[in-house]
Image (spheres, rainbow, N blue to C red):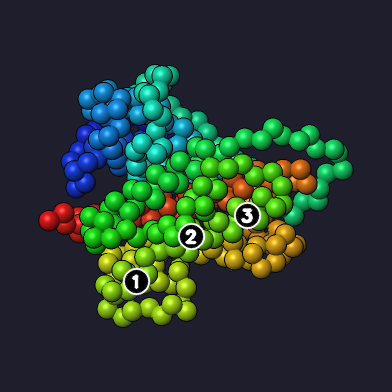
């Protein structure tokens, strides 16, 4: 994919503690698209920068995220880019070095994972050095924080719950063996399932039964609050993610599960290292959270801060 980031425009934001910009993109065919960029005032204060300088430095982080979206989410159309939010969870403590200036050209292609149905190679696999997937963990925490901030402003409660801290902590950990992978998948399933059902049910005109499950509950609530949600994009991603998590917890690493991985573009784990598989699943969760956040931001004209 070949796109040019032409520049930015500062616009007003409904959330008083965020600074909002529009980033203007153009592809090789001349198609244009703008995406909303929200940056926490706290980041501006920590970096000690005004809006004009702030977006130039923040673009160094935005650029990497745009490349990741192309590579991991297989974006091929400029209109598939969605709003991005930045706060202290997903930005560095100090302003990043200026490597790219606007306008800027980005060339990236979707990343091709090995098929999950491929057999293990007979060649010995060199064991990789353990590492922490801190960037994804921090990005997920930041997305959840932004979603809850908007939900708090609109409804007076947080939408995504954390009933225990341990599942969130596991997002920051590396994953290299079957036991670790099973632990990470169990923790992620908990995070995906924990929404504030009591608070959302209180607002639903037709309350949802507990037995209906998280996806149905969240979908009904968002449909009521926002008449035209992007169901296929947002809840399709949720259904895919929750489905593979539930299937893994039931059947573990059976061929049925591995085939399901392949259908979602998730690589098969090697005998020595599960990190690539775990990272791809985390990107699936990131993708859902980004879609949910975009839905909230698109409809934020309905939010009242009174």
Q: Where is residue 292 in the image (x, y as percent from the top left)?
A: 38, 56
Whether residue 295 is situated above or below residue 100 in the rendered picture: below
Going from the N terminus, do you reach mark 1 or mark 2 first? 2
Task: Give the side of residue 180 with respect to residue 78, left or right.
Answer: right
The one nearer the camera, 36 or 97, is 97
Question: Which label lies toward us, 1 or 2?
Answer: 1
Going from the N terminus, do you reach mark 2 or mark 3 first? 3
Q: What element carries label 2?
A: helix
Query: Is the Cβ of the residue at disc 2 closer than 8 Å to that at disc 3?
Result: no
Sort mark 2 into few (<14), some (14-19) or many (20+) by Cα contacts within 10 Å.
many
Q: Position of residue 68 (x, y in %)?
A: 50, 38
Query: Which residue carries the number 3 mark?
Result: 183
Whether residue 296 is situated above or below residue 66 in the rendered picture: below
Q: In which quarter of the image is residue 161?
A: bottom left
Query: Which residue carries the number 1 mark?
Result: 198
Q: Which residue lies furthest to the top in this view?
A: 98
Question: Which label lies toward us, 2 or 3?
Answer: 3
Q: Where is residue 205 in the image (x, y as percent from the top left)?
A: 27, 78
The one nearer the camera, 149 or 31, is 149
Q: What element carries label 1?
A: helix
Mark 2–mark 3 distance (CA, rounded to whole Å): 14 Å
Whether residue 219 is situated above or below residue 267 in the rendered picture: below
Q: Where is residue 216 in the image (x, y as percent from the top left)?
A: 43, 72
Task: Give the side of residue 280 with respect to residue 159, left or right.
Answer: right
The one nearer the camera, 106 or 280, is 280
Q: Which residue is drawn at 32% across and 74% down?
A: 201
Q: Can residue 139 be seen in this view?
A: yes
Mark 1–mark 2 distance (CA, rounded to whole Å): 16 Å
Sort mark 3 into few (<14), some (14-19) or many (20+) by Cα contacts within 10 Å.
some
Q: Is residue 31 visible?
A: no
Query: Which residue carries the number 2 mark?
Result: 192
Q: Which residue is drawn at 69% across and 32% down?
A: 129
């Amino acid at each position: 994919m070949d796109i040019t980031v032409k520049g930015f425009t500062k616009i007003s934001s409904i959330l008083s503690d965020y600074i909002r910009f529009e980033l203007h993109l153009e592809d090789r065919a001349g198609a244009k698209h703008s995406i909303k960029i929200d940056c926490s005032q706290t980041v501006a204060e920590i970096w000690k920068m005004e809006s004009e300088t702030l977006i130039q430095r923040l673009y160094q982080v935005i650029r990497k995220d745009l490349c990741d979206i192309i590579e991991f989410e297989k974006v091929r159309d400029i209109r598939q880019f969605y709003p991005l939010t930045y706060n202290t969870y997903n930005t560095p403590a100090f302003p990043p070095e200026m490597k790219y200036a606007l306008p800027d050209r980005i060339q990236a292609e979707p990343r091709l994972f090995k098929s999950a149905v491929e057999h293990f190679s007979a060649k010995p696999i060199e064991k990789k050095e353990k590492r922490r997937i801190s960037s994804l963990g921090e990005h997920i925490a930041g997305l959840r924080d932004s979603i809850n901030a908007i939900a708090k402003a609109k409804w007076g409660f947080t939408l995504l719950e954390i009933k225990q801290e341990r599942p969130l902590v596991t997002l920051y950990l590396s994953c290299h063996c079957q036991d670790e992978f099973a632990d990470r998948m169990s923790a992620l399933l908990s995070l995906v399932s924990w929404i504030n059902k009591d608070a959302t049910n209180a607002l639903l005109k037709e309350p949802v039964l507990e037995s209906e499950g998280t996806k149905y509950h969240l979908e009904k609530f968002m449909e009521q609050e926002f008449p035209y949600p992007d169901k296929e994009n947002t809840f399709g991603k949720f259904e895919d993610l929750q489905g593979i998590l539930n299937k893994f917890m039931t059947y573990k690493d059976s061929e049925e599960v591995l085939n399901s991985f392949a259908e979602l573009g998730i690589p098969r784990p090697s005998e020595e290292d599960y990190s690539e598989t775990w990272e791809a699943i985390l990107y699936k969760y990131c993708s859902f959270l980004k879609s949910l956040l975009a839905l909230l931001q698109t409809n934020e004209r309905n939010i009242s801060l009174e």
